[in-house]
Image: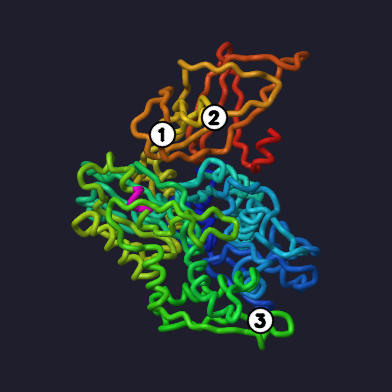
Amino acid sequence: MTQSAAAYIVGIDLGTSHTLLAYAPADGSAPVTLLPIAQRISGAEIASGPLLPSLRYQAGAGELAPETWNQPWPALFASDAAPALLGRYAQDLGAQVPGRLVSSAKSWLSHAGVDRAAPILPWGAPEGVAKISPLQASASYLAHLRAAWDDAFPEAPLAQQELVLTVPASFDEGARALTLEAAQLAGLPPLRLLEEPQAALHDWLLMQSAQVGEALQGTEWLLVVDIGGGTTDLSLVQVQASDGLPELARRGVGAHLMLGGDNMDLALAHGLEAEMAAPQPRLSAARFAQLVQRCRVAKEQLLADDAPEAVTVTLLGSGAQLMGGARSAQLRRERVQQMLLEGFFPLQPADARPQQRQAGLLAWGLPYPADAAITRHLAAFLHAHAPLLGPQRVPDSVLFNGGVFHSPAIAQRVFEQLTQWRGAPLRVLINEHPDWAVARGAVAYGLERAQRGRPAAAAAAPRGLRIGGGSARSYFLRLDSDDSRLRAICILPQGSEEGMAVRLADQRFALRLGQAVRFHLLASTAAGPVAAGEVRDLAGQELVHLPPLTAVLPAPPGRERAQVEVLLQATMTEVGTLEVQCVAVQDPAQTWPLVFAVRGEAGAAAA
């Protein structure tokens, strides 16, 4: 699908909490618009809104009437034996029966410790509940968007448009590959991936339009802090003045932090559990799950601009005691803000580092960080990038994004912390709609790409700014398995531009044909300047261990096994994924692609 053939540029934010779609004509002749997404909001009503809650209710056979779960359109991977609903009604039903609610599918999609293509959700569901995989759940949200779009634009199906799908900057290559697979399962065309912090910044740049140079005047380093439902994403962008528009380049991204609104819901639920469970010390797993959902709704109300003084949280009974066994407690706005500020955003010295002790939020099977204090993770991120930042140590501007920043108190606390470290106030780039920015920014990115090849006079909209920087990480191939050392060779340096193939011409590898081969890759965001082919000992550095690269290279006809001498070639594709190939030394036209084993340990072992 070429950009010239598409009528629209479409941006999709597949979020932990919400999924949404924005679009604009490919020629930039109209502003970016959010698609109203039709979804069931009750057993008898369908309504449209920009946000589709990323939730799926796995109903029991016969629990829902066929017209209920089949409208406005059937959920992907649902059947008469296992009907399913997505969106707001799924949210309401799941609050009553949490054991049937699929949530945090995006977090599970990034969890390399499980088989993400296996039916494991809802996590901990009781016997008899139909389960699906994180991959399928993600695909079903995307399929719902496709159906909503095709209903609104029957003359321009989504499969024929230019699509940009956003992912956390910290997603590893396995999670990115699975995100692309989910899009394929949903019937979407080949698309581009874009890091969410970059998308949020693209939206802000779009809002500035011709005034962007003035808005960024004096800014040298820009920090994007994106805290959503499931992740905290940190990115560092360098801003350089030029004769015309400023030049932007992303220079660093943070480690994958599974910290966000989900963790805050858990913390609030733990805070109410003793009161709700009395005289028992704890709630059952099912009732605690219900309490988490109730706390999420209360949190969103209490962090809103027009927040009430308090919200009553009611926990229903079970069975015959459904109403008689109900319990209620109040969450006051001041208490919630205090719990979240001190638990997740405590003021810390600049040399603070995340604590390694296990915390109470390590639950529900997801690998939440041992330390929930986002400010300590932020301090570690800035320390890791201190060589880039130089003497100032802290960026001079910050952009907040993500649903958490609906709370002015949280935004003020992070600003206060950064100001304390910097010794002077920062410039805050205002984002009035943090829920929408990522989807809108994905469209702005697509429009900017579409305009690059056009003469300025041919563009119907102001030319956007490109955010350069190339690959956010350096990628290494591990050379030995000695635990005391971690020798690795760089196959793709940080900053490598999209589409540029890096071939290790001076290193050759002997591979056996006709049997499985495996390469173990590592990624680092703070390895410093490194050249392709350089061998380093990475012991002690903060690394991401990627899923292994595997392949079975075919043996020549008539021979079960043989051996070939190859070079390795790595490319950061324009789609936004790492591509690695083996290239035959004797015949460079002969190549073998290597693929990431993302089916969990069992699948990797089978390879």
How much space separates mark 2 and mark 3, taking CA atoms? 55 Å
Towards the viewer: 95 or 545? 545
Q: Which mark is residue 378?
A: none
Q: Which mark is residue 497?
A: 1
Amino acid type, residue under disc 2 in the picture: Val
Residue that mark 2 sits on: 580
| Location of residue 533 in the rendering, given as x and y in whole percent from the top left corner | 43, 22
How much space separates mark 1 and mark 2, taking CA atoms? 15 Å
Quarter residue 66 falls in = bottom right
Is residue 87 covered in magenta?
Answer: no
Q: Quadrant of the C terminus?
A: top right
Eyeballing the image, is 321 above or below 199?
A: below
Quarter residue 468 falls in = top left
Q: Quadrant of the N terminus?
A: top right
Query: Seen in the image, is 604 located left or right of residue 567?
Result: right
| Mark 3 crowdedness (10 Å alpha carbons): few <14, some 14-19, many ≥20 | some
Residue that mark 3 sits on: 317
